[in-house]
Amino acid sequence: MGSLEGTVAENGGAAEAAAAAAATTTAPSCNGKQLEENGNAVDMAQTDGPPAFPAADCGDGPGATGVTTRKGRFGGLVALPLEVGTRMLCRWRDGKFHPVKVIERRKLPPTVSFCGGGHEYEYYVHYTEFNRRLDEWVKLDQLDLDTVEADVDEKVEDKATSLKMTRHQKRKIDETHVEGHEELDAASLREHEEFTKVKNIATIELGRYEIETWYFSPFPPEYNDCVKLFFCEFCLNFMKRKEQLQRHMRKCDLKHPPGDEIYRCGTLSMFEVDGKKNKVYGQNLCYLAKLFLDHKTLYYDVDLFLFYVLCECDDRGCHMVGYFSKEKHSEESYNLACILTLPPYQRKGYGKFLIAFSYELSKKEGKVGTPERPLSDLGLLSYRGYWTRVLLDILKKHKSNISIKELSDMTAIKADDILSTLQSLDLIQYRKGQHAICADPKVLDRHLKAAGRGGLDVDVSKLIWTPFKEQG
Ligand code: ACO
Ligand code: ZN
């Protein structure tokens, strides 16, 4: 997967990233529900669950079909249904009101729109303070009409003339993805934003989990009418109905990702899957991953990638926890293209394990590496945490008597990333035209404490791997 656009500035963006991520963590977890044996979902959220909303306030008029009005603040009238682009406050899962922009609206089925007054619509809103993964459909009751801003965002309104992308537009984007690995130009990027602004698949079932998705993913057109998809957790084929999945599971003979198991330590295993040898698996993995990655392009040309799929194994099989992809040949010295920990497994150290693993592969290749840009907010937090911990551990031992080049040779972390990490920690001084690391042990300890947990360790002695070589 290549990238379209950054969500966080590389330098100096960490604060916003942390704020956005913190916002995510304080939200009731959308990490997934564990399915009971009978297939019923058990909520795994760590918080109290969504606040109970008061019964619908049906507003002024019937207006089941035409435009209705509601009194706004200071007695002004707000036309309903609300226009796309309208900004106001909306009650979020935390029970508090946050600023939103209406991205899309749709009519509810007649059975739901029982009381008119604008209640026959629901609205897809973007919380302007938060990451796009928190965008959601809300009912009128959640919106505070008193806070509607006078000016509708014209640009959004223009763009909203058609949600459906024409086949031509779609082909154009697909071609861009397949043919060039280059970034989209501004126009295509706008098209991308337009087409992907509303999540298509709301939830997926994968193994024992039901997982709420975060972003749009370009599944083939025959899945356009689905809000939920059922994945085989082993071959990653996806289906529209549970019965289809159950039938599939009776026949599917995979119990782990295809490819070679290159690492096993306790119950953790890593499989290397060659996109050329396992094309369908690679494509399925990309479709799945895109549901949790925002500004990434889906490559149908998975031939060029290796996928490293991390699994927790038990007597039922090897269950995917996360993965990273890696170009077979990268001119930009990327050692990782996309990284994902599936939401039910996040914040347990797997992300840092995957990052550490990517650098262990680079060390075996005798190369330095860096992740493909841009990094998402969570990607940047995870990398910054990893880089900080690895570099400061070494600095503590060497009492800062070490150069950036030496640090890079020891860790396979690209010099630019070392410099930006140490700069962000204020550990670099520029003396006589050169960068010098200055690290007081007390300062190092303070930074290390702030860098969070170390994550799961990669036991290099358990890695059996040789770098990729094209056969023939
Ligand atoms: N809120 C605050 N901090 C967070 C959060 C969060 N929701 N998630 C991760 N972090 C930070 C923390 O510092 C955390 O360390 P800590 O738990 O010790 O405090 C650190 O990142 C990494 O935590 P891990 O448990 O090791 O990582 P995780 O398994 O959660 O995976 C990942 C991190 C892969 C980025 C995950 O969040 C994910 O899959 N996100 C969606 C996809 C994505 O954004 N991928 C990166 C795109 S960039 C690219 O692909 C090159
Ligand atoms: Zn299968």
Image (cartoon, rainbow, N blue to C red):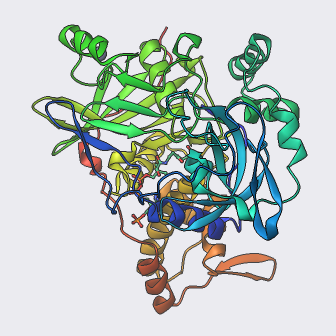
Q: How many marks?
A: 0
158 w.r.t. 229: above or below: below
Q: Is residue 155 visible?
A: yes
Rendered position, 178 above or below 47: above
Residue 410 can be seen, yes or no: no
Answer left or right for 239 relative to 146: left
**Which quadrant of the structure image shows residue 20?**
bottom right
**What x and y, as percent, mark residue 281?**
41, 18
Which residue lies at the image location 54% right of the left edge and 68% below the top edge? Answer: 96
Instruction: Name which quarter of the figure residue 209 lies in.
Output: top left
Where is residue 157? Give x, y as percent: 84, 39
Counting from the top left corner in percent of width and height, residue 407 is at 53, 65
In this orientation, which residue lies closer to the viewer: 389 or 102? 102
Residue drawn 43% across the image and 12% down it: 277
Q: Pick out the residue farthest to the front.
A: 61
Residue 108, percent across and down? 58, 31
Please give left or right for residue 266 compared with residue 468 in the image.
left
Left or right of residue 394: residue 12 = right
Seen at 45% across and 45% down, the residue is 358
- Most foreground residue, 201 or 445: 201
21 lies above or below 178: below
What is the quadrant of residue 39 in the picture?
Answer: top left
**Quarter of the figure that contains the N terminus:** top right
Q: Nearer the viewer, residue 456 or 433?
A: 456
In the image, residue 177 above or below residue 15: above
